[in-house]
């Protein structure tokens, strides 16, 4: 456990202070990134409360970095069997969840989806959203539909409305999942949608409680603040849930004095615990699930994983964002933000070779270090 001898005083009371490095190691441990975990794919997806899945490949790279013995088939199988699904949930983005989590998490974040619809109100003048939901449900449950097909069918009902707004409203009001083969490793398919109830053959379930969501968030991303949890979930007004849970939680402060909550028995490793290099996919939740991201992203490297509309995959060295990587042609290209030591380069090279063996064993790739990005 982390030794926290420094104490706050005055209004902050006597909460122990966790350094940025202590927060980094705690978060990496819960994210299964300090050491590869023996968990099954489904157990890991459940523990992590889902994986970012804006594109097909990121969940596979995310699990390859975290799990011992992972192969792409171990995720494609549950997706094909409908034990896992891809759906818009947290932060209005596509996530891959277990089927059980999908049925409770999507209702939990529905208020955020309702707010999203409000952004498109100008294109929905005269549209009865209740009727739209009924018509859209009938359409996608008759057969999976693409967003283009939804736009065309709904525009026939509301010719004066904006077609894109109609399709977005359907996606927000209904729990629409991306059906396979979309999402399967090595397969290519358009995004086609149906309702989660139709896809899973199960009725909707009550929403997970805010308190339960807080506990699961802390288990996967803590220690964390109220704002951190709201950033992760896209929900607002979560302070009340934290206050209800306060008697059963520990409290800390970060180096800026922000109050952090945590589970009493959650791991908080020594800040000097070694953190091996990790190749993560673009949009990995490790980098997106806190209001204050300095526990993973040094201030000097903020915003360096994207340029214009291009998003790069992050490379962690010593637990922090230290560069980006991409597969370019027949090469894995690694572009660090700083000069790496000889040992760091060797460790990064070894991790890169492992990632290629796990996910690209059928192809031959060179590995090269690009120019240090200033």
Image (cartoon, rainbow, N blue to C red):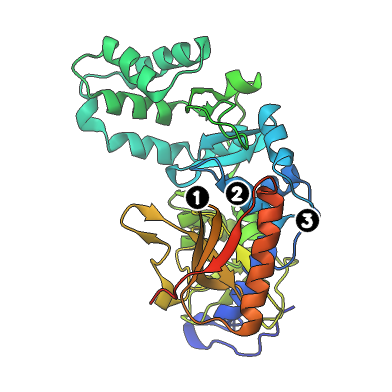
| Marks 1 & 2, CB-CB < 8 Å contact | yes
Q: How many marks?
A: 3
For label 1, the residue is 233
Q: Nearer the viewer, residue 100 or 73?
A: 73
- Residue at 59% x, 84% y is 341
Q: Relative to 213, is 325 above or below?
A: below
Return the disc, 3 or 2, that comes first in the chain's sequence: 3
Mark 1 vs mark 2, CA separation in Å: 9 Å
The C terminus - image quarter: bottom left
Mark 3 vs mark 2, CA separation in Å: 27 Å
Asked whether, in this view, residue 108 is left or right of residue 185, the answer is left
- Mark identifier at residue 68: 3
Within-10-Å neighbours for mark 2: few <14, some 14–19, many 20+: some
Q: Nearer the viewer, residue 302 or 339?
A: 339
Secondary structure beneath disc 1?
helix
Mark 3 vs mark 1, CA separation in Å: 28 Å
Q: Relative to 135, is 232 above or below?
A: below
- Residue at 55% x, 82% y is 13
Q: Quadrant of residue 317 in the image?
A: bottom right
Q: Relative to 188, is 202 above or below?
A: above
Return the disc, 3 or 1, that comes first in the chain's sequence: 3
Secondary structure beneath disc 2?
helix
Q: Nearer the viewer, residue 137 or 145?
A: 145
For label 2, the residue is 213
Q: Residue 111, image x and y in percent? A: 43, 39
- Residue at 75% x, 61% y is 36
Q: Residue 261, image x and y in percent? A: 59, 67
Q: Residue 273, image x and y in percent? A: 71, 79
Within-10-Å neighbours for mark 3: few <14, some 14–19, many 20+: some
């Amino acid at each position: 456990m982390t030794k926290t001898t420094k104490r706050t005083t005055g209004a902050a009371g006597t909460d122990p202070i966790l350094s940025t490095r202590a927060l980094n190691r705690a978060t990496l441990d819960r994210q299964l990134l300090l050491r590869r975990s023996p968990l099954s794919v489904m157990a890991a997806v459940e523990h992590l409360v889902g994986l970012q899945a804006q594109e097909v490949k990121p969940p596979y790279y995310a699990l390859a970095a975290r799990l011992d013995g992972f192969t792409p088939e171990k995720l494609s199988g549950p997706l094909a069997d409908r034990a896992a699904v891809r759906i818009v949930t947290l932060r209005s983005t596509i996530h891959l969840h277990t089927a059980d989590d999908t049925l409770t998490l999507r209702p939990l974040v529905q208020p955020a989806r309702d707010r999203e619809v409000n952004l498109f109100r100008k294109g929905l003048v005269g549209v009865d959203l209740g009727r739209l939901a009924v018509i859209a449900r009938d359409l996608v449950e008759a057969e999976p539909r693409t967003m283009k097909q939804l736009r065309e069918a709904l525009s026939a009902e509301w010719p004066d409305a904006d077609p894109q707004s109609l399709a977005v409203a359907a996606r927000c009001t209904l729990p629409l999942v991306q059906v396979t083969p979309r999402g399967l490793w090595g397969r290519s398919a358009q995004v086609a949608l149906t309702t989660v109830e139709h896809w899973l053959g199960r009725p909707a379930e009550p929403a997970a409680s805010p308190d339960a969501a807080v506990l699961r968030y802390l288990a996967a991303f803590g220690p964390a603040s109220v704002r951190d949890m709201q950033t992760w979930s896209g929900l607002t007004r979560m302070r009340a849930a934290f206050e209800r849970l306060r008697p059963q939680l520990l409290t800390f402060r970060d180096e800026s004095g922000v109050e952090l909550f945590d589970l009493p028995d959650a791991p908080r490793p020594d800040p000097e615990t070694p953190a091996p290099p990790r190749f993560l996919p673009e949009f990995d939740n490790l980098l997106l699930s806190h209001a204050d991201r300095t526990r993973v992203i040094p201030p000097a490297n903020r915003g360096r994983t994207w340029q214009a509309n291009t998003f790069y995959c992050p490379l962690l060295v010593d637990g922090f964002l230290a560069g980006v990587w991409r597969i370019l042609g027949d090469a894995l290209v690694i572009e660090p933000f700083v000069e790496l030591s000889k040992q760091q380069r060797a460790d990064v090279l070894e991790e890169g070779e492992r990632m290629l063996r796990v996910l690209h064993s059928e192809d031959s790739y060179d590995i090269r270090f690009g120019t240090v990005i200033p």
